Image (cartoon, rainbow, N blue to C red):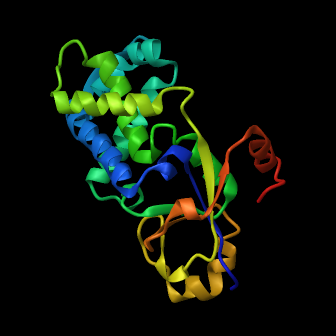
Amino acid sequence: MGKITLYHGTDARILEMTKEERQQYIDCCNLVIDNLYALFKPLTQQVLVEKVLNGNKIYVNEAPLETNYKEILNEKGGKYMYLNLSEKLMMLECRNNNVGNYQYNDLYLCALKSTAMNYAQRSYAGGETGLNAYRLIQGYDIIFSDSHKLDKNVLDAIDTIREFAKEGNERPAIVTIENVDINYLLFEDGKPLSDYDKEQRMERLFKHDYKFRYSKPIELNQCIVEPLTKELFYKIKEGEVK
């Protein structure tokens, strides 16, 4: 096939960081994740709960996070807080269990610009790792802040993430990567592309909503970077931009 173009959704502030600054921010996020996830993990373990349905007692498996905290999470954090937090806890559990789709060391690229746009809109906390950390911070504020005090280093890292994720600071952007080297592409779950994928299926793969890992070093700020303006948003939504 011809030249390959893929897309990456991010925040322009990340692109403006040096390599060292990006690593420092990721380290902050992972420090927060490691400390807060340990608090939440017991709340994600399912236990048998007695309920009454149509006058009959039934027993269902539920996690304490849902049974005891769903209402207060949504009350204090917004109506989707419980779902957002649960999703991130599930993703971190998968990461910790080495599930392929939830490893964050490589650069992730999308076949469709619309998919990259969706990722860009979720990058206000600093990509997937930043959003994982930020959701845990939000949950910590509601459930644990009065009962569990954190180390100063963790509190400093939390402040750094809060500032990055502050509403109004976001600058979503789409990066276009041209001339992608197919030999450095993996599927999203880390599986390599077969020779058949490379020779026969690639045109089809790139016409659908496939996501890839890209292991070749690349400076994203030297690629085509487009701020996600309202104009670009609607052009992508309406199919004017592929």
Q: Residue 190: x, y in percent?
A: 41, 69
Image quarter of residue 43? top left
Instruction: Note whether 60 is above or below 100 in the view shown.
Output: above
Q: Is residue 53 visible?
A: no
The quarter of the image holding the C terminus is: bottom right
Left or right placement of residue 103 versus residue 220 in this view? left
Q: Residue 72: x, y in percent?
A: 39, 13
Residue drawn where x is 24% and y is 41% of the image? 31
Left or right placement of residue 2 versus residue 121 in this view? right
Image quarter of residue 176? bottom right
Q: How many marks?
A: 0
Left or right placement of residue 205 versus residue 214 in this view? right
Image quarter of residue 122? top right
Q: Viewer-proximal residue, 239 or 24?
A: 24
The quarter of the image holding the N terminus is: bottom right
Residue drawn where x is 51% and y is 44% of the image? 13
Q: Is residue 192 visible?
A: yes
Q: Residue 88: x, y in percent?
A: 39, 39
Residue drawn where x is 32% and y is 19% of the image? 141
Instruction: Note whether 173 is above or below 110 in the view shown.
Output: above
Q: Viewer-proximal residue, 159 or 17?
A: 17
Left or right placement of residue 6 versus residue 37 in this view? right
Q: Viewer-proximal residue, 60 or 171?
A: 171
Residue drawn where x is 51% and y is 37% of the image? 124
